[in-house]
Image (cartoon, rainbow, N blue to C red):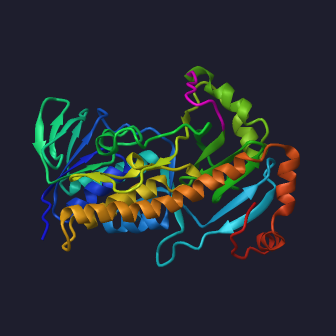
Amino acid sequence: MPRIGKVLVVGGGVGGLSAAISLAIKGVEVELIEKRPDFNVPGVGLGQPACALRIYREFGVLEEILDTGFSYDHMTIFDQERTPIVEHRFLMGGAGFPAFCALPRASLHSILYKRAVFLGVSFRFGIEVTDFSGPLGVSIGFSDGSNGEFDAVAGFDGIRSTVRQFIVGDMFGPRPSGIGAWRLQVDRPSCVTGMEFMQGIRGKAGAIPISRDKMYLFNIRPENPGEIFAREDMHVLLQERLLQFGGYVADIANDLNRESPIVYGALEPFIVPYPWHRGRVTMGGDAAHVVPPHLTAGAAMAAEDGFVLARYLLGEHGTIDDLITAYGKTRYDRNAFVYIFANDWLSMEQAVGSAAELASRQRRTHPKCRQAHRSGRPHSRYI
């Protein structure tokens, strides 16, 4: 029977914290290292679908997440002026779970961090792995000159992962898509009660409510790969990019200024095929897969990775190598589905290249979808 007594988790994002909590609940000694000096978490908001909420229930933090965030059960697609095209009602959730609950990234992170501390996870900040040695790669050298011995290493260290570099080298990793995402936390208009998209020409704007009074606005559109925008120019640049949109988007754009907390990031999707390990060093979250944000599934998939990894590492049937291999295959299959779906959606929306093509797509929306939107009945078709 394989025994895992001590695990190093590299990276303290949602995936790393989920792995640490899942292992600690089972009595494993967990050390988590984070290269940042603290958890001053960047980002805006995270939509958490029911699959992630079920995991948070296992952690004992579901109620706090639901109390902090905004729950919703629908997504609506609008034209540039926020005229409805079609509404989709999610069939997830049920039995005490909303279909989605979105909340500020920092809030989710704080909730998970506090839970991990309560469970006895040991944290070390401002430190990185510099060496994986020994036949299984789990004799670890750290950037502060210290060393450690572990039964397994779980890399959740993000898109520029050191752990992924050890496992697969440069064969797989982030690739520029030529698409960027602008995000901004703002006050929530009462009309925004779920996830919504405003389809434009070569891109879209939209919003997700993240609390009773806040939402995050986003704009996804073509940008030059590697472009770095000066902080003092970002409000003007975002105003220019939002010119094609009306409704509350136009109102928010008009109010942007140098102090507006605008966040920009290039989309660099990729997925590493399994196996996701070398020796007893494995990976998950953004280290193994990054998808476009269209399904709001990135953090949820990372949380699933951490939860499932713990289940496999502590399995009783098969060798540890067998169990880690099975983890990689299981999670690759799941994440590949999300990756393909999100990339197809990104491609479709970016392919709307003119006003005439946008109008044509609106006309081609299935009549039953339009009728379902008017009647309020659940449905799932959209442009």
Magenta stretch, main secondary structure, is: loop
State whether residue 347 appears in this view.
Answer: yes
Q: Which image quarter is the N terminus in?
A: bottom left
Q: Is residue 229 magenta?
A: yes
x and y, in percent, of residue 120 in the image: 17, 54
Against 125, residue 285 (above or below) is below
Query: What is the tally of numbered marks visible in this picture?
Result: 0
x and y, in percent, of residue 221 in the image: 67, 39
State whether residue 66 appears in this view.
Answer: no
Residue numbers of the magenta segment: 222-230
Along the viewing direction, whichever of 345 and 77 lies nearer the viewer: 345
Asked whether, in this view, residue 112 is left or right of residue 229, the answer is left
x and y, in percent, of residue 109 in the image: 38, 49
Residue depicted at x 44% and y 64% = 333
Along the viewing direction, whichever of 314 and 280 lies nearer the viewer: 280
Along the viewing direction, whichever of 232 and 192 lies nearer the viewer: 232
Q: Residue furthest front?
A: 171
Q: Is residue 198 magenta?
A: no
Residue depicted at x 75% and y 50% = 199
Q: Which image quarter is the C terminus in?
A: bottom right
Against 316, residue 31 (above or below) is above
Against 257, residue 382 (above or below) is below
x and y, in percent, of residue 222 in the image: 67, 37
Residue depicted at x 59% and y 48% = 215
Residue depicted at x 45% and y 53% = 299
Asked whether, in this view, residue 163 is left or right of residue 173, the answer is left
